Amino acid sequence: MLRRQRTQIRANTDQEVDVMTDNLTVTVLGTGIMGAPMARNLARAGLGVRAWNRSRDKAEPLAAEGVYVADTPAEAVQGADVVLTMLYDGPAALDVMEQAAEALRPGAVWVQSTTAGIEAIGELAGFAREHRLVFYDAPVLGTKQPAEAGQLTVLAAGPVEGREVVSPVFDAVGARTVWTGEDGAAGSATRLKLVANSWVLAATSATGEVLALAQALGVDPQGFFDAIAGGPLDMGYLRAKAALILGGQLSPASFAVTTAAKDARLIVAAGEQSGVRLDVAAASAERLARAAEQGHGEEDMAAAYFASFDEKP
C-alpha cells in the first residue's frame, strides 16, 4: 500500500511541483510485448493506470484489469502524474509525446523506457525540459515472461528528489532497480542497456549459428548440449533459445526479430560514435535484418537462426 506523502520535485525549472504518492496515476504509452504486461502489473499494484497504443486492439484487453484505454496520447496523459513510454524507438517516443504535449501537466514525471539509443536520449530529454517534465532514463532488462511476472530489472537515471514518485512504478514492473546516475539526460541507463543488449544479441546469434552448423554437419544438437553440460560454456539462455528453435516455438515472440535488429543498429552506432568497432554486433544486425526479409520479423529473435540458410531448412 502506498504511503500518503506529498513529494516536491524540481521539474527542470525553478518551480517545485507537488505530487501525491498515495494515489499515483500512471499513463503507459505503447502496450506491445513489454508495455501491456507492465501496464497490467501497475494496475495490479493499485495504481491508477491509463494506456494508449497505436493499434488500439492491443490495448483493449487491459480494460479488464481496470486500465482506462484512451483513443489518443493526449487523452491518455490527461492528469497523469507519471508517463511511461515503451515504444519502438527514440523517434517513435518523441512523436507520441509530441502528440500528447498539449495535455501534459508541468511537473509530471516522464519515465522513458524505450530502448532509444544515445543520440535520441538527448532529444527526448530536451523535449522534457521544454515541457517542464521530470525526466527519467529508465530502460529495462528482460523480455515478455519477466515483464508478465513483474520481474524486470529497471536501469534508471534521474533526480533523487523524484524517486519517491517513481519507486512505486519501478517496484510494480520490476524485481529490482539499478540506479546509474542522477541526470536522465546523460543517458547512463541507456548506455548500460546497450552494453547488456550487445551480450544478449551476441549469445542469440551464436545459438542460431551453432544449431545451423550442427545441422549442416549432421551433428545431433543434443550431443553438443551433453558435451558442454555443467561446464563454463553451458548457459541457461543458450538452452532456452535453442529449445525455441528446435521446437518451432518462435511465436509469439518474447523479443521480436525487428526490435532486436533495431537494437543491434543502435549498439553498432554507439560503438562507432565512441571509436569502437563492434564486428559481432554488426554481424548480428545483418543476420537479424536478413531473417526479417525472409519473413521472420515478428517471430522471436531466435529466428535469426534462419539467416544461416538461403532457404528455410
Image (cartoon, rainbow, N blue to C red):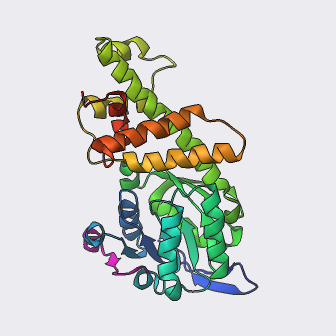
Image quadrant assignment for residue 189: bottom right
Residue 88 versus residue 13 in the image, above or below: above
User: Can you give x and y, in whole percent of width and height, for residue 184 in the image?
Assistant: 67, 64
User: Can you give x and y, in whole percent of width and height, for residue 133 in the image?
Assistant: 62, 78
Residue 194 as seen in the image, left or right of residue 207: right
101 vs 159, nearest the viewer: 101
Residue at the spot x=58%, y=80% of the render?
A: 108
Which quarter of the rendering shows the C terminus? top left
70 inside magenta stretch? yes
Residue at the spot x=38%, y=41% of the render?
A: 301
281 inside magenta stretch? no
Q: Which region is colored magenta?
A: 61-73
Residue 255 can be seen, yes or no: no
Residue at the spot x=34%, y=23% of the render?
A: 212
User: Can you give x and y, in whole percent of width and height, for residue 73 in the image?
Assistant: 42, 79
View extreme (right): residue: 14
Residue 286 versus residue 210 in the image, above or below: below
235 vs 303, nearest the viewer: 303
